[in-house]
Amino acid sequence: MIKHYILSLNPIAKHEWDRCILRDPLTAKRPDIAKLIAEAVGADTGSYLVSVKIEVQVLEEATVPQAEQLSLNVGEVITQAPQLREVA
């Protein structure tokens, strides 16, 4: 069974549970891994020793743009302020 998910990593998130999020790309719901394994095993009641192999392959990476810091030269603002007053 092959499933595709979107993994979002944010190491500076406020809450620990928001630092690593796995979501379905269509529904945006978080997957229930235990339910997926149960579906693969079948519907028979019982306890199972299972081996789960997770193979991760990055298909596409979308980086989050970082906020740009703009420098403000206070001297330029002060010298342009009188010009703005003259126009008004």
Image (cartoon, helix red, strand yellow):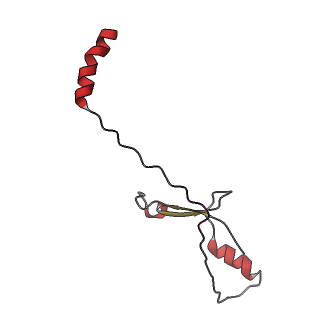
Q: Quadrant of the C terminus?
A: top left
- Does residue 46 appear anywhere in the picture? yes
59 inside magenta stretch: yes
x%, y% of residue 43? 77, 80
At horizontal 68% and vertical 74% (from top left) the residue drawn is: 36
Image-based side of 85 in relation to 35, left or right: left
- Does residue 88 appear anywhere in the picture? no
Image-based side of 69 in relation to 46, left or right: left
Residue 38 in the image: above or below residue 61: below
- Nearest the viewer among 58 and 12 is 58
Image-based side of 45 in relation to 54, left or right: right
29 inside magenta stretch: no
Number of numbered labels in the structure image: 0
Q: What's the magenta bit mostly, secondary-structure-wise?
A: loop
At horizontal 66% and vertical 66% (from top left) the residue drawn is: 4
x%, y% of residue 24? 64, 61
At horizontal 61% and vertical 78% (from top left) the residue drawn is: 54
Residue 81 in the image: above or below residue 30: above
Image-based side of 63 in relation to 2, left or right: left
- Residue range in magenta is 58-62
x%, y% of residue 61? 56, 59
Report which quarter residue 52 is drawn in.
Answer: bottom right
- Nearest the viewer among 50 and 44 is 50
Report which quarter residue 34 is drawn in.
Answer: bottom right
x%, y% of residue 83? 29, 14
At horizontal 30% and vertical 9% (from top left) the residue drawn is: 86
